[in-house]
Amino acid sequence: MITARKLFSSVAVATVMSLAAVATANAGDERTTTVKAWDLNLSKPADVQTLYERVQAAANDVCREEAQRHYRSTRHAAPLGWRSRCVKETVDASVREIANPRLAALLR
């Protein structure tokens, strides 16, 4: 049972870091990354916290890369506050997609 739960968590987390919820310069040009979760047991609060931190770090990396891509293509910085909104929306969407109550509680 725990092995199945870990497998489900790994598969779910591997697909959650999509920027589908965040507007990008080119529609359909989504940035994604994989967040490792196979080593975590999401019934343990410390592991849930670790997953949350990994999701947040990955969202920060993806949004930073998106802001840099925007600058390279337009020679204009992303609007003020865009990156922090990007990270927040990406983490929110990822946590909703994972659908783990303990992880959702950390978001609140």
Image (cartoon, grey):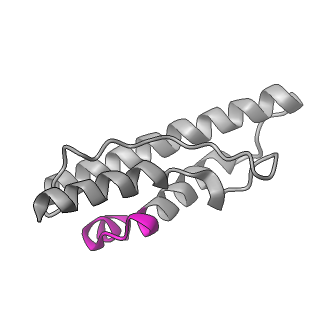
The location of residue 42, given as percent across then percent down, is 19, 60
Relative to 103, is 59 on the left or the right? right
Residue 32 relative to residue 55: left or right: right
Quadrant housing the N terminus = bottom left
Q: Quadrant of the image for the C terminus? A: bottom left
Furthest-right residue in view? 74
Would you place residue 49 above or below residue 33 in this image?
A: below
Instruction: Please give the count of numbered marks on the rendered protein.
Output: 0
Instruction: Compare residues 1 and 77 and report the one nearer the observer.
Output: 1
Q: Residue at x 63, y 45 (%)?
A: 83
Could you tell me residue 98's position as x and y percent? 38, 64
Decide whether residue 98 is among the magenta residues. yes
Residue depicted at 12% across the width and 61% down the height: 2
Q: Residue at x 15, y 53 (%)?
A: 46
Q: Which residues are magenta?
A: 95-108
x and y, in percent, of residue 95 in the image? 41, 63
Which of these two is toward me, 48 or 11? 11
Q: Is residue 100 above or below residue 80?
A: below
* Residue 70 quadrant: top right
- Looking at the picture, tell me which residue is in the foreground, 99 or 10: 10
Residue 19's x, y, as percent?
A: 61, 52
Q: Would residue 76 be found to the left or right of residue 95 on screen?
A: right
In the rendered view, tell whether residue 36 sits above or below residue 94: above
Judged left or right of residue 40, residue 31 is right
Residue 45 drawn in magenta: no
Residue at (44% x, 41% y) in the render:
34
Q: Main secondary structure of the magenta part?
A: helix
